[in-house]
Amino acid sequence: MKKIVMIFCAIAICLTIAGCGNESKTEHKNIEGTLPEIMEKLYEGISEDELPMMVENTELTSENFEYYAFADVKYKEAIASESMTGSIAHSVVLIRLEDESDAENAVQAIKENADPRKWICVEAENVYVLSKGDLVVLIMSNELAPKIKENFENLK
């Protein structure tokens, strides 16, 4: 009788451990879609009149990555959305990392080095660096930053 009870206890423990293991995997699910598609989602709810003049996406390469992201991190792909007018403090950098486990270190490195005065004449009032799955975003802007941050946090 004791053997049967022990077997049932062992099975219950195994099922409990397996069940908990599955939960943690779904918490860090990567966001699907191309970076331009995800960038569009970050601007949802913001009218064209509210956007800075001439906002365009720029693909980031090994030559320009640190100018936009302010850190050297291992990434798969990245884009920046900025105003083509240099006197407007607005930058949204979206980075897909090679490895999701590097997200915390990437966020920390970018936070420590981000320069909200990179435009020299103007300064971004708000700076946010966030991660979700294998994505990291750097948002430097004025009144648009909280809405873009909210949109990033709501990505599924």
Image (cartoon, grey):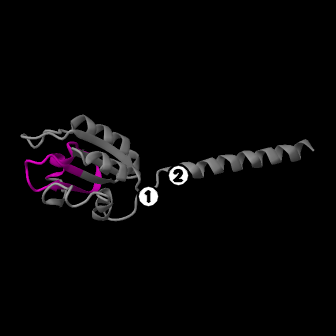
Toward the top, the furthest residue is: 112
20 horizontally vs 132: left or right: right
Amino acid marked by disc 1: Lys
Indicate which disc, 2 or 1, sits on the residue closer to the N terminus: 2
Q: Nearer the viewer, residue 36 or 8?
A: 36
Task: Provide residue 2's location: percent of width, then percent of height.
Answer: 90, 41
Please provide percent x and percent y for residue 7.
Answer: 82, 47
Q: Are marks 2 and 1 in contact (CB under 8 Å)?
A: no
- Three-letter residue code for mark 2: Lys
Q: What secondary structure is marked by label 2? A: helix
Where does the magenta region start and end? Answer: 64-92
The crowding category of the residue bearing disc 2, from other C-alpha atoms within 10 Å (few below 14, some 14 to 19, many at least 20), is: few
Task: Say the numbered circle drawn on residue 25.
Answer: 2
Residue drawn at point x = 33 percent, y = 48 percent: 149
Can you give x and y, in whole percent of width and height, for residue 25 in the image?
52, 52
Cα–Cα gap, marks 2 and 1: 15 Å
Residue at image point 12% right, 48% down: 88
- Reply yes or no: does residue 89 show up in magenta: yes
Residue of label 1: 156
* SS label for mark 1: loop
Q: Quadrant of residue 120?
A: top left
Q: Residue at x 40, y 56 (%)?
A: 155
**Foreground: disc 2 or disc 1:** 1
Q: Horizontal placement of 29 versus 105: left or right?
A: right
- The tag on residue 96 is none
User: What x and y, as percent, mark residue 123?
Assistant: 14, 39
Residue 38 is one of the magenta-drawn residues = no
Q: In the rendered view, tell whether residue 68 sits above or below residue 121.
A: below
Nearest the camera: 14 or 142?
142
